[in-house]
Amino acid sequence: MFEKLQGILKKVDADYGDVRYEIKKDTVITFNGKELTQIGSNSTDGYVIRALKDGGMASVVFTKEGDAEKSVSTVVENAQLIAKNIEKPVRLAEVEIVKDTFIPALKENPRKVSMVEKLELVRKYNDIPLGYEKIVTTSISYQEIIREKYFISTEGTEIREDLVTTRLFGEIISKDGNLVQNVRVRAGGSNGFSTVRNQEKNFEERTAIALDLLKAKPVEGGVYNCILNPNMAGVFTHEAFGHFSEADIIETLPSMREKMKMGNKLGNNVLNIVDNATLPDQLGFYRYDDEGVKVRPTQLMKNGVLTGRMHSRRTASEFGESISGHCIAEDYRYAPIIRMGTIFIEPGVHSFEELITMLGDGLYILDAKGGQTAGENFSFGAQYGYVVKNGKVSEMVRDINISGNLYKTLNDITVVGNDLSLSKVGGCGKRQMNIRSCSGAPHILVNNLVIGGA
Amino acid sequence: MEKLLEMAKKVFDKAEVYSVEYTNNSVAFENAKLHDIDSKFQSGISLRIIKDGKLGFAYTRNLINREELVQNALDSLKGGVEANYDFPLTKELPQLDKYDSSLEALSSKEMVEECARVCDYLKSKTDGEIEMTSLTSIDQIRIINSEGTDVSSKGTIYSGFGGVMYPGSSTGIWRVFRSKKFEKISDDVVKEMIDLYRLSSKVVEPKGGKMKVMFMPNSMITLNWRVFSGTSSKSIYEKTSPIADKLEEKIFDKKITIYDDPLKDKYPGARAFDDEGVACKPLTLVENGVLKNFYYDLNYANKLNAKTTGHGYRTTQWGGDPITLKPVPALTHMSIKSGNKSFSEMIKSIGRGIILEGTLGAHSGNIPNGDYSVGVSPGLYVENGEIIGRVKDAMVAGNIYETLKHTVDVSDTLYPCFGGWMPAILFDDVSVATKK
């Protein structure tokens, strides 16, 4: 394969070029309620070429081999067009030249588990919620996405890496009269089929929440002190803070760059945040990014002070900061962009019980349900929550959406728990989907969150 | 394609081959400077087969190995996905004007020049951070099936968006543009962006509570997604629609008429047939507030003993790669009938309220139930008919089955926006949470 890619790369008349070829194997099994609605395994493939010429950088994607020549000339022409229209040429940070093959070790290779066995496992899980009268339907999918990647560059880097993702996810939907409630269920990871086995208890617990939500009251809108559970706090860290630590998000926003300068004190002293995609057995794990750079642990915040940033080669050069290996594509249909790997708030010393006592009165909010940011403002939903009175968890509440300002909220995180937990299923939609996006935190106490209620 | 269909017909009772080819070019300006030019040349083939009432499905990018594709479809049959329907025989289709050859000749250079023109102008008139992206898309779809259907289409879309952002916020005033061929962004649109940006540059901190909220076209996706969910035959079948038993009942204010018209080729992206080869036709979902219809694809029409309305599309809530997705019921050309007041007249009628220019988190919350709870991004605050600034850290929340009952006015114009062509709608009595 590398020889074939060299054949394409040598036609790229540029100062720098790279070609990534991928074979993507998808397996999917979906149940909607009792019915199996999709099952199958398929394979697709395609190429991405990037070229840097005279200081302009462009990319092209193609799926037919016959389009290679047209693609090569298009990407070079576009790079030159950019070069003519920009004042400051694009440069790429220097990196080590790598020749490596990395096929990760798996705890049970999903390729070797038969479709029949996968189907029966998903059916068994799906039957758990459907055994309850008030669960009207489910939408449960098993997905296996295998990216077999080949990367070469004109600098001599040559990398072959596999990313094997297994994921079990969906919704359990309960209904009473006209009231419909839904709860998400999630399992999976980067290290094999074992990540989706033994999920019966998980399905039982999520079903119980879906049923309890039918009796829960909508939360009253207002400003609350809150405890966020690890999933919710992880999504906050990813959405509200993490995206601004992606250099390409702030690269062209002068005021944002000023706010996100290294050494700026942005958060409470208790806050330490890191992105570490080298942690083995976690969803966000990988060795090389999609421009051939080895990923490294990146301390983003230490004691509330900004200490690092996630970069592509282009932004590392632009910011004059260290490369980090965070330039990732969804698959062969996209040029890579900067993505988080495994981002989390590092654990503190307090137990969950201590946090509840410290909160006194407020809300305990659990499990994110979609999130979005625009600049310093963020908004995301929670699947459920509880009212906390006098340091005791009391009745369940629903329809919780929180919004806030990043900088205020980073200072309003006053206590960090000791119970770190990382997500098992990802789905960050920054222009492309990143199913390996992994986030987490311990329980955290946050003051003054705006909760939108009906 | 024909060979593949012949091969599939020998093995299966019924077969369908869907093929697509698309070329995209995009030019992106960040902070009013050229940043990226990306091109894509993609194609693919997808095979659906039915044997003994069961469905098989397979796809590939390159039809190098027909046997393997047929084998993958055969393997997927074993799962037992029910399919008690036939593929359609579609003979006559309305002729749509959806292709403009001039777009094929449009160069990246011309796209760069137009973006530069608009960015430079916005920069000279505001202190905001300017972003703009323009895209061209040329797509060809062909569907052939064992019933004898052979339908195809070719279309062109020139689209994009531009925005002026308040410094340090990455939120601002955005406008979307969309046409069948290259068109310069109109001066009116640019002027409106500048005016709204200037009027809202001051941050104000009003008290929350129930007030009037105007959903601008860019915010309508919040309501649309809940309408998609409530009126989908899939939700009816799965018993998750709160309006399943409300046909011919009044569910919204009488000013609300919601329809889907794929044939309207005044707009780019019109469709004469859906992704199952069924002929498209206009469908009224809600007429003067009364629920009239649900929308169906072949599969759910069969399950509910109804007829397909031609709404089987290979898509998801987030779009997606059509060859890898099976058709599902989808409203791809939904719109809301315009009213009779201009945007500025509507603002004048607001005593105290928010103009919701954009939202954060339209996809979160309990969509089947119709609940929404979105951050303002941005929210322009209005007092006594005048925009006096913008609100930060506020949330607008409610349930569409309540909110749409409190419609005050619908704008007299439909605007291109993320998700289609929509009016601005002013609602009363909507809950707004702020920090005060």
Image (spheres, rainbow, N blue to C red):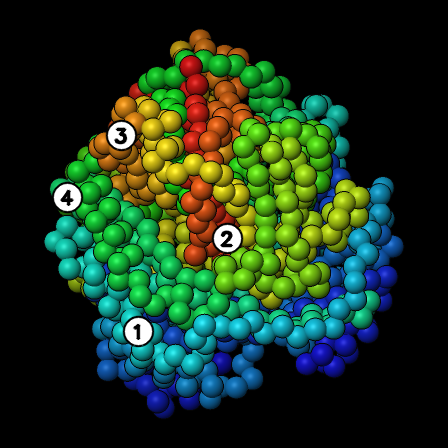
Q: Nearer the viewer, residue B354 or A309?
A: A309
Q: Is residue A11 visible?
A: yes
Compare marks 4 and 1 and give the one earlier in the sequence: 1
Do the residues marked 2 and 4 share a common chain? Answer: yes
Rounded to the nearest angstrom, the CA distance separating label 4 from label 1 is: 30 Å
Label 2 close to label 1 by CB (< 8 Å): no
Compare marks 2 and 4 and give the one earlier in the sequence: 4
Label 4 close to label 1 by CB (< 8 Å): no
Rounded to the nearest angstrom, the CA distance separating label 3 from label 2 is: 31 Å
Can you tell which mark lies on residue A119? 1
Disc nearest the viewer among 2 and 1: 2
Can you tell which mark lies on residue A392? 3
Protein chain holding label 3: A
Protein chain holding label 4: A
Judge the density around disc 4: few (<14), some (14-19), many (≥20) Cα neighbours within 10 Å.
some
Q: Amino acid at mark 2?
A: Cys
Give the structural element (helix, strand or loop) at label 4: strand
Give the structural element (helix, strand or loop) at label 3: strand
Judge the density around disc 2: few (<14), some (14-19), many (≥20) Cα neighbours within 10 Å.
many
Q: Amino acid at mark 1?
A: Leu
Can you tell which mark lies on residue A438? 2
Q: Nearer the viewer, residue A96 or A31?
A: A96
Do the residues marked 2 and 1 share a common chain? Answer: yes
Rounded to the nearest angstrom, the CA distance separating label 2 from label 1 is: 26 Å
Protein chain holding label 2: A
Q: Which residue is mark 4?
A: A176
